[in-house]
Amino acid sequence: MPALNLIAPDISCDHCKHTIETELPTLEGVGVVEVEVPTRTVHVTYDDTVTGEPAIRARLDEIGYPVGG
């Protein structure tokens, strides 16, 4: 499974971590999601036959954590 490491500047607390780790896997094809609050990093594994980086970025934006850059 491919993996992404994305920076979401609006991550600031454990509530943010919980929201992302709960909501992002509802996107079909997303596997493991881990959030590091201090670095504002979202680590995502996904099935690239089902989804891709644009859809993952869009889902993060929908739940209120747009990816920087």
Image (tube, rainbow, N blue to C red):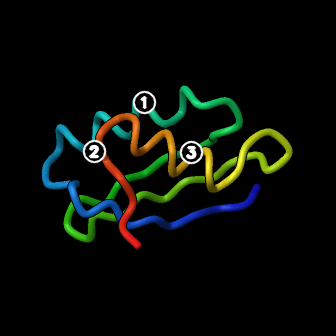
Q: CA distance from mark 1 to mark 2?
A: 10 Å
Residue at 30% from the left image edge and 34% from the top image edge: 19
Q: CA distance from mark 3 to mark 1?
A: 12 Å
Q: Secondary structure at mark 2?
A: helix
Q: Is residue 12 above or below residue 38?
A: above
Q: Is residue 18 above or below residue 5?
A: above
Q: Nearer the viewer, residue 20 or 67?
A: 67
Query: Residue 69's mark?
Result: none
Q: Position of residue 45 (x, y in %)?
A: 63, 52
Which-is-in-front pick, marks 3 and 1? 1
Q: Amino acid at mark 2?
A: Lys
Q: Position of residue 4 (x, y in %)?
A: 58, 63
Residue at 22% from the left image edge and 42% from the top image edge: 16
Residue at 59% from the left image edge and 31% from the top image edge: 27
- Say whether disc 1 or disc 2 marks the residue closer to the N-terminus: 2
Query: Residue 17's mark?
Result: 2
- Say whether disc 3 or disc 1 marks the residue closer to the N-terminus: 1
Q: Position of residue 5 (x, y in %)?
A: 50, 67
Q: Quadrant of residue 53?
A: bottom right
Pointer 1: residues within 10 angstroms few (<14), some, or many (20+)? some
